[in-house]
Image (tube, rainbow, N blue to C red):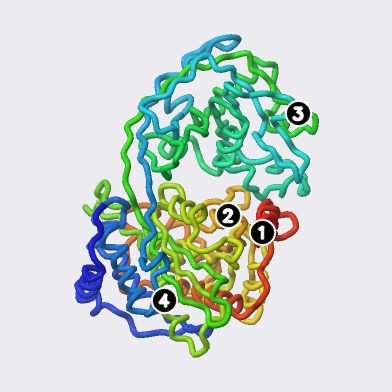
Amino acid sequence: MKRNTLTFGLLLTTAVWYGCGNNKKADTQTATGAITDNDIRGYLSVLADDSLTGRKPFTEGETKTINYLAAQFKQIGLEPANKGSYFQDVPLVEITGTPTAMQLNGKASATLKPGTDFVASTRQELPSIEIKNSPLVFAGYGVVAPEYGWNDYKDMDVKGKTVVVLVNDPGFKSGNRTLFHGDTMTYYGRWTYKYEEAARQGAAGVLIVHQSEPASYPWSVVNTSFSGSKLYLQQSDKHLSRCKMEGWLSEETAKKLLANAGITEDMRAYARKKDFKAVPLNTMATISISNKLKYSTSHNVAAVLKGSTRPDEYIVYTAHWDHLGIGQPDTKGDSIYNGAVDNASGTAALLAMAKAFKNAKEQPQRSILFLSVTAEEQGLLGSEYYATHPLFPLNKTVGNLNMDALSPNGESKDIPITGKGQNDLEDYVEAIAKKQGLTVEADPTPGAGGYYRSDHFNFAKVGVPALDMHTGPDSKTHGRKWGEEQDKIYTDEHYHQASDNYTPDMDLSGMTQTANILYQIGTQLAGETTFPQWKKNSEFRAIREKSMAGK
């Protein structure tokens, strides 16, 4: 994609402001910080405007969006973070894979239908892949976790084989809070981990058994999300180190396969036993996948405010700028998916945050990086690229504070922390909330693994303490029941729909509440000399300790 100049970005700003400026509400100021509702409103009205055509990567909407962001960072007075540029190139490949039916031969002989019995794709950047007569092996949860004394692959060589594994981790619904994290999913429970570990073990293929409760979504979501075209970061080895096939099996199909191997009891309980060993299923799988490959480059946008006394230490604020672009028209004929809440809200807050830090009477002692990442909707790809190609050393990165889909329902009396119990950044939230008379709550659905589903996770994955928090449903004005109803309405009617639009009468005080709490945390971190740590039982603690040892 050819970039337009920053001059175009400034012209875009002017053009859109003329369209939106007359709709601004009266300026408001929360009692908790330097960021106002209108600071966010001004940026939000632009980022969610139709002129940005839904902010989809590889489109004119990307060009307009990233130039607007760069122009605003420049206007605020921040330095470009990437060797004189506000942009970090993110090379991506789009793979559209079409699988054949899967042929099973052996004790269980059958022809499995794609979309009904399984879904399958490949990351390998090849015109096609083939798996022929690959022995199927049930590898339990597919987990290797030394800190828990757990290894589902022990005493089993799976090279060239296709492993069948369970979604989530052994602790989920085990009734044992000390087994992993009990009902709170660890990263070992995520499908991304299952794919990664199977590749490390040398498996030819990996199939995750879908079950709605431990996955936290129905088969229909698997069918739509894991088939068709997908974006991946380009890799020098063209992903040849990954399994040839990655996919899912329906629960019904998996039960038949396991029964043929003598496993008729609850598969989760069976795999949870301490003496579990991987089980050959006495069945071989054959499948081929044909691919269409498309290469292109998207962009992260990065600006930095240099610290006054410790400029080589960085606090990173993130928010993804991308959304879904132009899609099917809704009942009102609207086909532009503006993503006002998801995530023009977080991106607007990021700009407002940058402005607040730059205008503060006392400048931060540590540097602050403002990073707006691409392709979150395609699998957290922009943040993954930054985490694996950081502009500044990870062992000099103090922490990550992420903003994604901030609430349009006003201020709340509660602050939920996604994946509560992970790191010391939560203690900063607790202290601020206590002063403001707010309650801090755990993730209401910890088994869904929400901590691993937004851009902060990629910082956690490389050891950087990362925080994702929001205003909760307990509305200061209308109460909890009303707030829960509003959350449900957004999820059911507006999430990833063309109706996720900005309107001038939106109550942005909840967005401002979140932004000001995160601003206060950043201000505190900037004035300290210590680094926040991971909690003792976090799966990311060892990664950070190793990183900091080489500081």
Are discs 4 and 3 less than 8 Å apart at CB?
no
User: Which secondary structure lies at badge 1?
Assistant: loop
For this rendering, which residue is in front, 477 or 154?
Answer: 154
Relative placement, left or right, of 465 versus 73 is right
Q: Quadrant of residue 114?
A: top left
User: Which secondary structure lies at badge 4?
Assistant: helix
| Residue 383 marker | none
| Residue 352 marker | 4
For this rendering, which residue is in front, 140 or 220?
Answer: 140
Q: Assess disc 2: are there few (<14), some (14-19) or many (≥20) residues with their C-alpha within 10 Å of its C-alpha.
A: many
Q: Quadrant of residue 501?
A: bottom left
Count of numbered circles in the view: 4
Badge 1 amino acid = Gly
Circle 1 residue: 550
User: Which secondary structure lies at badge 3?
Assistant: loop
| Residue 276 marker | 3
In this rendering, which labeled residue sits more in front, label 2 or label 1?
1
User: Which secondary structure lies at badge 2?
Assistant: helix
Relative placement, left or right, of 59 versus 491 is left
Quick one: label 1 or label 3, which is nearer the N terminus? Answer: 3
Cα distance, mark 2 to mark 1? 27 Å
Q: Assess disc 4: are there few (<14), some (14-19) or many (≥20) residues with their C-alpha within 10 Å of its C-alpha.
A: many
Q: Assess disc 3: are there few (<14), some (14-19) or many (≥20) residues with their C-alpha within 10 Å of its C-alpha.
A: some
Name above or below for residue 427 compared with residue 524: above
Image point 25% across, 59% down: which residue? 3
Please provide percent x and percent y for residue 519: 52, 76
Cα distance, mark 4 to mark 2? 24 Å
Badge 4 amino acid = Ala
